[in-house]
Amino acid sequence: MNGADIRLKAIIRDVCRERSAELTEVEVMPDLVRLLVEVDPQFGIHRLVKAIKGRSSRLLRQEFPQCRTRLPSLWTNSYFVSTVGGAPLAIIKKYIEHQKHV
């Protein structure tokens, strides 16, 4: 894990804490980030994702020059969201943890 990955995780934790979202798991991979997060439906997952992408893009591009080469932004506009419903959180968390080894 490099410095940008560590910093990204810290930014995600900060944004989730500020937005009263419970971050259970985060996995950073070269081409995607997987989160297991509980967010108030009144606030909306779309607002949380927008806040995470916006802040992390701004801060990572300021702090890590290698992140400035991706123009015009560090992130795409797209993201995927799925609910876990009645699935045990331990199983979902384990799935996310093991994805970096696939």
Image (spheres, rainbow, N blue to C red):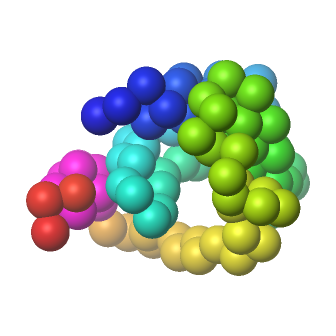
Res. 52 image quadrant: top right
Q: Residue at x 32, y 67 (%)?
A: 87
Residue 79, image x and y in percent?
A: 65, 72
As for residue 90 lying within the magenta part, the answer is yes
Q: Nearer the viewer, residue 23 or 34?
A: 34
Pick the quarter of the image with the C terminus.
bottom left
Q: Residue at x 29, y 57 (%)?
A: 96
Q: As displayed, is residue 27 above or below residue 101?
A: above
Residue 8, image x and y in percent?
A: 55, 34
Q: From which residue to which does the magenta span run?
A: 88-99
Q: As displayed, is residue 99 above or below residue 5?
A: below
Q: As displayed, is residue 18 above or below residue 33?
A: above
Q: Residue at x 59, y 76 (%)?
A: 80
Magenta stretch: dominant secondary structure = helix
As for residue 96 lying within the magenta part, the answer is yes
Q: Is residue 54 left or right of residue 4?
A: right
Residue 3, image x and y in percent?
A: 43, 25
Is residue 94 in view from this perspective? Answer: yes
Q: Is residue 59 left or right of residue 1?
A: right
